[in-house]
Image (cartoon, rainbow, N blue to C red):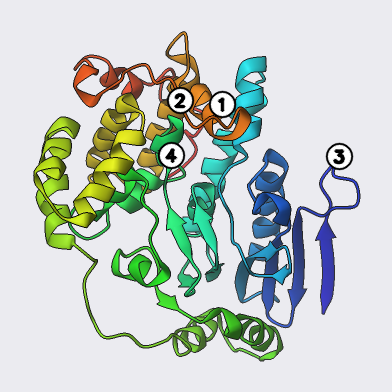
């Protein structure tokens, strides 16, 4: 048995990513509990290094990843990227902002294409960047405490980290619903949305983890099979309000979707409309196009498109919608972002397509190496 912690420069005694090999598995714990394990550039680099180490280690049959909670392991998985850093770096013109997204998306690709089973324990909050490091897992485990969302439109961003790819592959138009509104879903709903593979109750997680470390598995497939045998059984069902979601979110434009929600008198529609109305009208247009385009894209092309989009989120306009959205949520905390448009109907038809124009040629794109 070997044991190794990766230290991040400048973090003092805190290890932001804990890495160890125990038995036949590689273990990764995100260790920034006070920030709900929000990802920094250091953490992205440490995760990438850990995964490459484990991939090249013949002792490791499978990789496990979890978050550290304030009271111990598990509790929360990952709340996303470090949006305070995004805000600070954008205002300072710091080039490490671009490095963050390039390296984060490359990490997302590595996870989706990983050569060994990669198992994500998605307890508690799983949002944004947390989805990026879990949706490519070969086994995606949720709990009764999972709170999953891609809420980026509420900060003037879009569901990145491969969000176009995995949301577009949800049943029906559930992906459009989740991406445009940013609504939270439970662990069970995540399974019905195709965003998780099985549920294991929170109280069982420590013993499950311990068993994985102490069992002499013969192969990575055996690890996966044993975990799948531990899932809580559910009666087959479909995502809540799916027929209504498909009816509204299959429409051609954000404005039509909004009008359809207004005409639907259900509690579900009222909640969806309220969430939609809090989002950046401009980015709602971008996100609908993103998910629709991604439906016919492979992962690498989707991540390249998202790298283009995120560049424009910070550079296309004199005033960044994303910087303003983060200011309102996390910096000033007034929760009143001054979006560039007050309503979906004010977004001109020639505005949102600009986000999809790449600032790079295929030969110079920062993610050109992804296949």
- The answer for how far apart the CA atoms under marks 1 and 2 are is 8 Å
Q: Can you tell which of label 2 and label 3 is closer to the viewer?
A: 2
| Earlier-in-chain disc, 1 versus 4 | 4
| Earlier-in-chain disc, 4 versus 3 | 3
- The answer for how far apart the CA atoms under marks 1 and 4 are is 13 Å
In the picture, which quadrant includes the C terminus? top left
Q: Residue at x 59, y 55 (%)?
A: 78
Q: Can you tell which of label 4 and label 2 is closer to the viewer?
A: 2
Q: Is residue 52 above or below residue 205?
A: above
Assess disc 2: are there few (<14), some (14-19) or many (≥20) residues with their C-alpha within 10 Å of its C-alpha. many
Mark 4 residue element? helix
Q: Can you tell which of label 4 and label 3 is closer to the viewer?
A: 4
Q: Can you tell which of label 1 and label 4 is closer to the viewer?
A: 1
Q: Which residue is mark 1?
A: 327
Q: Which residue is mark 3?
A: 10
* Horizontal side, residue 64 vs residue 315: left or right: right
* Horizontal side, residue 150 vs residue 285: left or right: right
Can you give x and y, in whole percent of width and height, for residue 218 in the image?
59, 89
Whether the residues at callouts 1 and 4 have beta carbons within 8 Å, the answer is no
- Front residue of 217 and 125: 125
Whether the residues at callouts 1 and 2 have beta carbons within 8 Å, the answer is yes
Whether the residues at callouts 4 and 2 have beta carbons within 8 Å, the answer is no
Can you give x and y, in whole percent of width and height, for residue 257 in the image?
15, 39
Q: Which residue is mark 2?
A: 337
Mark 3 residue element? loop
Q: Which residue is mark 4?
A: 152
| Earlier-in-chain disc, 2 versus 3 | 3
In the picture, which quadrant includes the N terminus? bottom right
Q: Is residue 92 visible?
A: yes
């Amino acid at each position: 048995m070997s044991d190794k912690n990766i230290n991040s420069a400048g973090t003092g005694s805190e290890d932001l990513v804990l890495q160890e090999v125990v038995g036949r598995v590689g273990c990764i714990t995100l260790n920034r509990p006070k920030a709900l394990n929000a990802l920094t550039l250091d953490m992205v680099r440490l995760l990438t290094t850990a995964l490459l180490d484990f991939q090249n280690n013949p002792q490791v049959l499978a990789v496990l990843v979890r978050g550290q909670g304030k009271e111990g392991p598990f509790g929360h998985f990952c709340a996303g990227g470090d949006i305070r850093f995004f805000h600070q770096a954008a205002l300072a013109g710091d080039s490490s902002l671009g490095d963050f997204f390039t390296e984060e998306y490359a990490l997302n690709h590595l996870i989706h294409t990983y050569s060994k089973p990669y198992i994500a324990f998605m307890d508690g909050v799983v949002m944004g960047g947390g989805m990026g490091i879990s949706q490519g897992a070969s086994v995606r485990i949720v709990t009764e405490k999972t709170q999953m969302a891609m809420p980026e439109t509420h900060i003037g961003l879009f569901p990145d980290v491969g969000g176009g790819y995995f949301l577009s592959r949800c049943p029906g138009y559930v992906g459009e619903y989740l991406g445009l509104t940013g609504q939270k879903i439970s662990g069970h709903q995540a399974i019905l949305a195709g965003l998780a593979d099985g549920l294991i109750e929170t109280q069982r997680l420590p013993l499950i983890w311990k068993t994985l470390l102490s069992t002499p598995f013969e192969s990575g497939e055996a690890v996966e099979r044993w975990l799948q045998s531990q899932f809580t059984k559910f009666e087959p069902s479909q995502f809540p309000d799916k027929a209504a979601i498909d009816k509204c979110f299959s429409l051609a434009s954000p404005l039509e979707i909004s009008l359809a929600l207004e005409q639907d008198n259900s509690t579900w529609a009222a909640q969806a409309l309220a969430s939609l109305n809090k989002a950046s009208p401009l980015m709602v247009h971008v996100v609908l196009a993103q998910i629709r385009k991604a439906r016919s894209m492979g992962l690498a092309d989707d991540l390249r498109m998202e790298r283009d989009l995120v560049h424009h989120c910070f550079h296309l306009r004199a005033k960044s919608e994303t910087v303003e959205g983060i200011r309102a949520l996390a910096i000033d905390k007034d929760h009143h972002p001054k979006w560039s448009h007050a309503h979906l109907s004010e977004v001109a038809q020639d505005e949102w397509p600009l986000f999809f124009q790449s600032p790079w040629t295929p030969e110079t794109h920062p993610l050109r190496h992804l296949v």
